[in-house]
Amino acid sequence: MPSWLKDAVFYEIYPQSFRDTNADGIGDFNGIIEKLDYIADLGCNALWINPCFDSPFKDAGYDVRDYKKTAERYGSNEDLYRLFDEAHKKGIKVLLDLVPGHTSEEHEWFLKSKKNEKNEYSDRFIWTDFCFSGSRDYPYIGGESERSGTYLLSFFKCQPALNYGWLNPDESWKCAIDSEAAVATREAMKDVMRFWMDRGCDGFRVDMAGSLVKCDDVKKTGTSLFWQDIRAMMDREYPECALVSEWSQPDIALKAGFHMDFLLNVHGGGYSRLIRDYQNNTDHNILSDPFFTGAAGIDEKGQYEDHSFFKKDGGGDICLFLEEYLNFYNASKGKGYISMLTCNHDTVRPSYNLTDRELKVFYGMIFTFPGVPFLYYGDEIGMRYLNLPTKEGGYFRTGSRSPMQWKRGKNLGFSDAEAEALYLPVDPAGDAPNAEDSLKDPDSLLNMVKALLKLRHSDPDLQADAELEVLYAEAGRLPFVYRRGARILAVNPGSAEVSVRLDAEDRDLIFSVGEGCLKDGILKAGPQSFLVF
Ligand code: NOJ
């Protein structure tokens, strides 16, 4: 386990939208280098950069055309190596995004794989054996290749699935996981990983990590074997490099070898009960998307009700979250970390339904829970989800990918290009938050995050490893109280002061949003408070 993870706090950067230094309207590596001091000052000591490789960008770069070459729009490979160096000088680690499940349909491997004559890449992707026969279980495309066969997709049409074999091959065109073709794909992916780690990258966020071996069982035996092999390579050759999976099943992903697994805001999952709890709301494209609908409802007046936990007086139930979380936590203890996110490039920004004060209470909890937290760029200033037309396969996700708001003035400090030339428009609102003003305002969300991360870095009990114990959590009641090591923490998203009897000695408040105290065995938590005793 890389030791730096104990005290890591990640900052996710969507490179298109972070900072443009050459006035071409799109972010670049030099822009990230320019802002490293800002990131360090905020308290983040690790980055996850979304795919920055050569790509036709039909899925924002998750359609990789060349795994070993950066996209020119961000800069050269050398610029990225310099970013690794500059980040390291400031104590910041850099994780790139590894997309092992598919390439772009324009990747050289795939172009060769489509050819009729057999070659080294014929089985690099998953092909059926006849132009008219498809797959029972996965989407496939026919009619686009010289060879007679159809190929399986991993996500969009532009993303053919790489071949890692099948757990139980039951048709002649399916390879086993230890077949020559599946092993060759695995070794090719290792080669890509080594390429970047040899040049200073500190590991990878892994896209759709649980999807590699096809027809896998629920326990993901085949895919887990694949990752265990990768982890053995990392332990042997790059013991200080880290892997975080987009899997959202920490009980399985950490056993499979990942150091961390994301807990995502997926529909029905416990996390969705914390900050986004929508249903039956059709006034907005994201809210009508079944992926994001939760368990709220419409009241008798036709008003939408939000029962997410951090919504002031939303009446949300922390137990709906804890039920899932504690199962994952208990199953993953000692094996690796659960990573909670403020949101990411696929999900709606938390400010969509939470006010700055609600966000403070929410961030309080996710930055003091066990494991390794991730902050999505701009969430520290409460950047808003914008209603934008789709860009690069983003669809509803595009609204969370708008340019970072650095300061007032032209393009809010993102770029010197003309506004029409920007990758995406900046938030047009007159009161759009920005980093410069937020830094000056002692009450800002940003300064709260900064102060909390400072405290976290100074106190191992608030970092990844210290034990979590739930001290008070009751359906329909507040506050939620938990212990991390020697610290006691309380969360009250409601508008009324609440109190609870605790078997604990008097303690001082060492950090707070709002007010509270712990005296004579009673913990009092003021309205909308987050408290660390
Ligand atoms: C998950 C990524 O986060 C998302 O942005 C992408 O579209 C899909 N995987 C496909 O790679």
Image: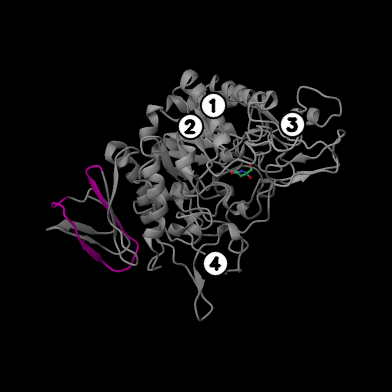
Q: Secondary structure at mark 2?
A: loop
Membership of 487 in magenta stretch: yes
Q: In the structure shown, which secondary structural element does the residue marked by tag 3 occupy?
A: loop
Spatial CA distance of label 1 from label 4 is 40 Å
Q: Would you name the residue on which mark 2 appears?
A: 257
Circle 2 packing at 10 Å, graded few (<14), some (14-19), many (20+), is: many
User: Which callout, 4 or 2, points at the residue further toward the start of the chain?
Assistant: 2
Cβ(mark 1) to ligand 1 < 8 Å? Answer: no
Which residue is at 81% across, 36% downward? Answer: 129
Is 450 a magenta residue? no
Dots 1, 3 in contact, CB < 8 A: no
> Amino acid type of disc 2?
Gly
Report the front residue among 58 and 213.
213
Q: Mark 1 sits on what residue? A: 230
Circle 4 sits on which residue? 279
Sequence order check, earlier mark of 2 and 1: 1
Residue 240 against residue 316 in the figure, above or below? above
* Separation of marks 2 and 3 at Cα, in angstroms: 28 Å
Of marks 2 and 3, which one's residue comes earlier in the chain?
3
- The image position of residue 291, as x and y in percent, is 58, 57
Q: CA distance from mark 1 to mark 3?
A: 23 Å
Above/below status of 250 relative to 309 = above
> Is 233 on the left-hand or right-hand side of 497?
right
User: Mark 3 — residue?
Assistant: 107
What number is the disc on residue 306? none
Numbered disc 4: secondary structure: loop
Kindly check if marks 2 and 1 are in contact, taking CB atoms under 8 A apart as contact: yes
**Residue furthest bottom in the image:** 301
Identify residue type, mark 1. Answer: Ile
N-term mark: 4 or 3: 3
| Residue 54 appears in the rendering | yes
Q: Amino acid at mark 4?
A: Gln
